[in-house]
Amino acid sequence: MKADAATASTAMAYRGPMAPPDAQAPFPVVVTIVIDQLAAWVMSDRLSTLRPDGGFARLAREGTYVREMRFAHAVTDTAPGHAALYTGVTPHQNGIVSNERIDEALARVSSLRDPKAIAVGTQGPREGDTNSSIAALRVPTLADSLRAAKPDAVIISLSLKDRGAIFGGGRTPTDVVWYDHTKGNFITSTAFTRTPPPWLASAWKEDHEPYAARSWDAPLRPDWVKSHTASADGQDGEGDYVGLKATYPHDLGAASSPTKAFRMTPFADRVLLSMALRAMDERAAGYHPTLVAISLSSNDYISHVFGPDSMEAWDELDRLDQELAAFFTALDRRFGPGGWGAVLSADHGTAPMPETAGNTALRPYCAPGYVDRWKRPCEKGERLLLEPLGEELDAVAVKTLGKGRWVAGIADPYVWLTEAAKKLPPARKKEMLAAVKAALLLHPGVARVLSSEEFPDACPPDEIESQDALLCRAHAKDAGGELYVLTKPGSFFDPNYAIGKGTSHGTDMVFDRAVPLFVRPGHAPSHGRVVDAPLTYRAFARNAADLLGIPAPKSVESAPQF
């Protein structure tokens, strides 16, 4: 079995063409990085513990660090978060209200699944393999604005998830790819091209294969990890996903599905960053206006399985910090330090695992007298298990209506009805929804349940942060299911990986809505500016547009720029 990668080899993984010492790319190269589930509270608490030569420290030193950038919607999940970042508007306007939906076959599928789209692998279209598109998005993206302003722009977007890649690439990307964990390779979609990117086959062989069966043996810096978290290896609540185990070592080769388990390791970060450099080289980035959107999802998967306070989560952040440092050095080599800019943020925050309630070593913010800026939960939350809860609610509907299948299933945060239920006479449907709603409210982790008809047509401005306003902006007409379920702080829908274990997100609370923002202009460093006051999520697209040298989309014109 291949051993874990040593730190010293990181820089070698990103070696590339060397620019002359004073060289600068003729056109702006802007890299946007979204780290899935990187909460503002995590970065605020841990930034000072990371290495001074790490990637986060470099961004903070050479640019602006915003401690708290807040989303203005309650559905703090990946697809809504990415869509909001890259459009500058909330789900109410952009139409992306969830990660998944329930389809006609009563299966949970990606909210971007498009029956007209076919997967495209290294050999071309895979007929019969339905895939994703951007059709569900109702507004333009940052990449769309770049394409309109500069038709020859290079636009590259990569992620482990379709919902992490598609919004960054917009409607006419040069290349957009994501990971197909069912087959263990990277793909795109006929919604964008019928021809795989010319660099994809090489990336599969040279970037991915060396890490496809590695063993994540131990933390990179065991003593550092142990000194910063009170969590034991295999803390109560940590999960075992497909045989990856809840304790080190996490051996991909021993997992029942190495292609699925790969996402739950730091190796996926390295692969994506290496692929991004390969794509930039192939597409002559810097010789055209260039946007490279990278969505790094390992942090999300690791927190979902092991929790944000685990040894694995700390190790992931440490390793990612080093990978980013090496990646930024590789950008220096290609474009010169002044030839590239970066905007880094996250799509949502995270919650502590329910099992850590009462443990003030892991939840020091729950100690008497502590005033927590992030309003993190202290009570023990509830995991709402998707399949059992769906069955429970359907049984309630059957008791109300009689035999039949009425509840199609749950795709966080919505309860979806079957076509038969949707066609019920209004009075009967209302009666059934009332019974299902009452059953949901009996769960200690459920705060509110709203039917789609209860949401107003118009929402308050983003600056208003009442719960009703956040919920309004989380919903879009004809985009979600019939009942929206808001969980209480610390409670969440089970992420459905290591079922009944790990953590998730999805509430309206600040610990879920607040994320960090780093802006490194490149051409005009702001030298270590720190912004402590909360800022709007629209600052992400506003500053990326400024670095690209294009007019800011109207939706973000008023956002701060650095």
Image: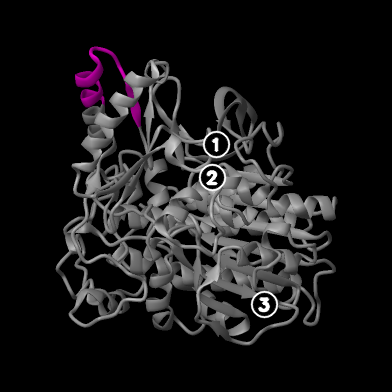
Toward the viewer: 394 or 426? Answer: 426
Amino acid tagged 2: Arg
Mark 2 is surrounded, within 10 Å at the Cα level, by few (under 14), some (14 to 19) or many (20 or more) other residues, namely many
Q: Would you say 172 lies left or right of 233 here?
A: right
Which picture quadrant has residue 112? top right
Which region shows up in magenta?
Answer: 394-409
Q: Please, is residue 76 above or below residue 415 in the view?
A: below
Quarter of the figure with the C terminus: bottom right
Cβ atoms at labels 2 and 1 below 8 Å apart: yes
Q: Can I make out residue 9 in this image?
A: no
| Residue designated by label 3 | 562
Q: What residue lies at 60% left-to-right and 79% top-to-bottom?
A: 64
| Marks 2/1: CA–CA distance | 7 Å
**Residue 116 image position (x, y, % from top left):** 62, 24
Residue under the point 55% across and 26% down: 130
Q: Secondary structure at mark 1?
A: loop
Residue indicated by mark 2: 163
